[in-house]
Image: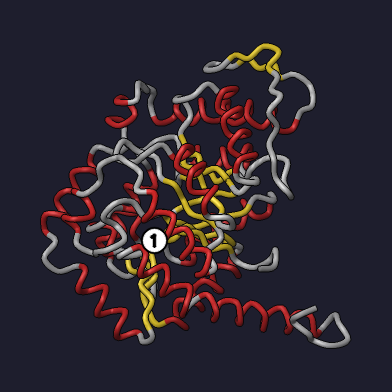
Amino acid sequence: MKNEDLKFHWRLSYSGEAETTTWDRQFSVEDGAPHIEMQVDFCRKAEEAGIDSLLTDFGYGKPDPMLLAAILGQQAKKIKFILAYRSGLFAPTMFVQQLNTLSSLIDGRLSLNIVAGYSPDEQRAYGDFLSHDERYERTEEFLAICRAFWESKDSVDFQGNHYRVEKGALKARYVSPDRSFPEIFIGGGSEQANRLALSQGTCWMRLPEASEALRESVAPVVARGVEVGLRLAVIARPTREEALNTAMAMAEGVDRAREFVKTSVGHMDSVSFKASYEMGGREWLTPCLWAGAARIYGPAAIALVGSAEEVARAFIEYKRLGITQFILSGWPKLDEMVNFGRIVIPIVREMESEAAAYACSGRCEAPNASR
């Protein structure tokens, strides 16, 4: 994969998610324990499918993402891991020490997905009672300290409203073949998330919306040298009719799911999650972007639906807007990931090569995409 190619990441599967699309099973089987044999197999299939990284989620129903990535990363030798974490749960010095240690254990195959939290109820369960805006202020300080440790050869001193560090120093360094600190994905659709991505992140990871609205929000971020990514789901099939039939079948007989998601969103203070849930009432945001799943599987479930070529073209269109990274999911996770790697990624790569050859034809002696 070339540096300018789109990067496709996938959400790691947990117990019950790899085998079924049944809502009741997906939301009732979680036991909070790692299922290493199943998850190592998922990692290896992700490598074969051409997936760049796997997102290890954070939440009360999941095992700790850093410990899980350490175990999986030593058994699956190529796949990378995106660790989801929130500020306020670790002192930043300790967090960097742990992350640097992990980088040496899995050859730097990691990045961070930092979110400020979306549910006040869950945050309070972890001992965090700050408001939405205060959580973003704290996350700004948290990441500023982390980056100071990664980027400075001297000791770190910091004093803010939420953290204070004096003469901070760590012998454990971040280990990577090509980076001095991990990629930092900042998740969220609020103004605070946007500002945080610009000040401390390497990629603003947001939820999708219609193309024109995306264009307006993405352009200023890309102009500042920060990447933009989308978190969404995929339902790709050989034909559009097959994809639509699959999507509509998922929407049948799920009244309990709809009520659960509606209640959950009512307790959230996430700007992007609430906005995405509202988009679900419109069903189709573009001919391929289905928002209806957001009211069944949650706000992060807005999905690209269509034939393999239609879905591939949608990704190329996102690339034209300046969007370069994607954290994806599907139902069931394993089958959809394998299918995506088999029928969509090859078309995307072919389209990227054709575009590169066309661009090169105006600058090079021969439009050879392999050069």
Rendering coords of residue 116 (x, y %): 44, 35
Residue 334 in which image quadrant:
bottom left
Q: Residue at x 86, y 82 (%)?
A: 364
Task: Say few, some or many: other residues with alpha carbon within 10 Å of mark 1 (under 14 / 14 to 19 / 20 or more).
Answer: many
Side of 171 where 109 appears, left or right = left
Q: Is residue 185 above or below residue 216?
A: above
Residue 296 in which image quadrant:
bottom left
> Would you name the residue on which mark 1 appears?
329
Q: Residue at x 60, y 45 (%)?
A: 106
Q: Is residue 342 above or below residue 106?
A: below
Residue situated furthest right in the rendering: 365
Q: Tell me the kind of residue under disc 1.
A: Ser
Rendering coords of residue 213 (x, y %): 47, 60
Rendering coords of residue 3 (x, y %): 70, 63
Q: Residue at x 61, y 27 (%)?
A: 97
Rendering coords of residue 238 (x, y %): 38, 85
Q: Residue at x 46, y 24 (%)?
A: 88
Side of 319 where 293 appears, left or right = left
> In the structure shown, which secondary structural element does the residue marked by tag 1 occupy?
strand
